[in-house]
């Protein structure tokens, strides 16, 4: 139930998708304190990645129903907050969005990644080793390849690639994940994962990372906060109460302030929570990182509520909320109460030996704003 767009910057009916999202990204870069020259580079990278479909006017319906965002815009922004430092801006995108069919979508995605590898001088050997697993001739599923760029100062992004474990069928997804982990040398990793209702994504860090990660995303249907505290497999891990509390606050389960924790048993029956387990070394067989992704948009009436949840979790973890305010205002001019889905997910990110971080995912809403409930 999505109506046509009502918010955003000044839109003319014929404004192209590429212009719309690159303007958003330019403003976001500025709001996050990146140099204007870096913002211009990143805005250009974004439109180049989308290819010819960037020229498509926004008043023409999306060329294919991308699963990347609810209104099918093939772009989503995120802010990764850390205590005591400015947050990092990232952008997730689907380079094969304009392609005819999922197989071609994947081929375009691979081509774009390899062109980036050439341009910025990083290796793609890990991805090359998995190509037959994730790019079968007749792929299935909601995506073929997504890219995330971490927009650092200097105009050279860090790159992450998201692949679809269900490419050869949803019933083969667990086998595909196990085989992919194996091929990358993580032979004990699959056994370490918690019980799963599905494996929506398999992700790789490519490019200039200190410790590149292999990440497995796990779906948890009807999760309760009580269970969420037990999902991490890192050692040491986050405090279970930290994870439970995050879920309760993000999903709005702590309705009675006099009984904190009363929401622990409530199951989330809407869009499922995802956990992500990141592997950096194969010595222990255990992941070094754990993330809990809460699709906050499914558990609020409007973005005013989602915003309040984001602020609550950021404050709880000692992070400044000013960058969130500035970012939301650059992405859309609509009132938060006038729609739902601008804040798509809130995530709690734990990496061994570091204080927890928080990530907020911000929708472009280039095509549509979902009305509030
Ligand atoms: N739109 C998809 C979903 O809601 C995929 C997705 C986009 C996603 N951004 C995300 C999943 C951030 C987890 C976290 O699942």
Image: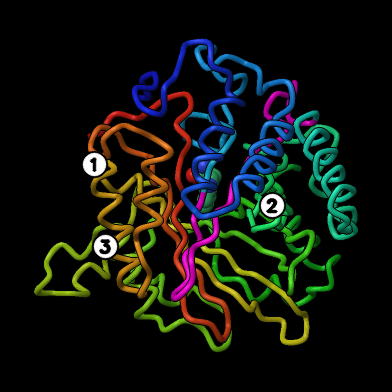
Q: Element under label 3?
A: loop
The quadrant in which the N terminus is found is top left
Q: Position of residue 68 (x, y in %)?
A: 56, 38
Residue on which disc 1 sits: 301
Q: Element under label 1?
A: loop
- Left or right of 92? Residue 284 is right
- Left or right of 341? Residue 308 is left
Q: Depth check: give the residue in front, 19 or 66.
A: 19
Q: Depth check: give the residue in front, 347 or 37.
A: 37
Q: Is residue 310 above or below residue 271?
A: below
At 37% from the left and 24% from the top, the residue drawn is: 2
- Left or right of 55? Residue 119 is right
Mark 1 / mark 2, whichever is N-terminal: 2
Q: Position of residue 14 (x, y in %)?
A: 53, 11
Segment tinted magenta in the rendering: 78-103
Mark 3 in CB contact with mark 1 (< 8 angstroms): no
Corner quadrant of residue 199: bottom right
Residue on which disc 3 sits: 266
């Amino acid at each position: 139930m999505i109506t046509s767009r009502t918010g955003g910057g000044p839109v003319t009916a014929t404004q192209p998708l590429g212009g719309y999202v690159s303007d958003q990204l330019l403003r976001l870069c500025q709001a996050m304190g990146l140099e204007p020259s870096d913002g211009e580079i990143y805005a250009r990278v974004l439109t180049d990645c989308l290819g010819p479909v960037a020229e498509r006017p926004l008043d023409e319906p999306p060329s294919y129903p991308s699963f990347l965002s609810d209104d099918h815009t093939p772009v989503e922004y995120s802010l990764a907050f850390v205590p005591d430092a400015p947050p990092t801006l990232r952008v997730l995108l689907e380079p094969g969005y304009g392609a005819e069919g999922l197989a071609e979508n994947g081929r375009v995605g691979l081509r774009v990644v390899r062109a980036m590898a050439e341009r910025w001088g990083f290796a793609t050997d890990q991805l090359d080793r998995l190509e037959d697993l994730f790019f079968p001739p007749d792929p299935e599923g909601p995506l073929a390849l997504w890219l995330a760029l971490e927009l650092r100062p200097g105009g050279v992004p860090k790159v992450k690639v998201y692949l679809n474990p269900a490419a050869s069928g949803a019933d083969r997804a667990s086998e595909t994940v196990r085989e992919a982990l194996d091929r990358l040398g993580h032979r004990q990793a699959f056994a370490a994962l918690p019980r799963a209702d599905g494996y929506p994504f398999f992700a790789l860090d490519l490019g200039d990372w200190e410790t590149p990660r292999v990440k497995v995303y796990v779906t948890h249907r009807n999760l309760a906060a009580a269970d969420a505290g037990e999902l991490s497999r890192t050692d040491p891990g986050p405090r279970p109460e930290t994870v439970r509390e995050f879920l309760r606050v993000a999903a709005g389960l702590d309705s009675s302030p006099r009984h904190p924790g009363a929401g622990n048993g409530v199951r989330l029956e809407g869009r499922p929570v995802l956990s992500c387990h990141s592997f950096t070394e194969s010595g222990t067989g255990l992941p070094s990182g754990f993330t809990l992704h809460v699709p906050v948009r499914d558990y609020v009436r409007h973005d005013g509520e989602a915003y309040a949840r984001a602020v609550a979790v950021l404050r709880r973890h000692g992070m400044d909320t000013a960058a969130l305010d500035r970012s939301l205002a650059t992405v859309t001019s609509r009132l938060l109460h006038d729609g739902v889905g601008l804040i798509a997910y809130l995530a709690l990110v734990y990496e061994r030996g570091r204080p927890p971080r928080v990530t907020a995912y911000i929708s472009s809403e280039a095509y549509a704003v979902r009305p509030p409930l």
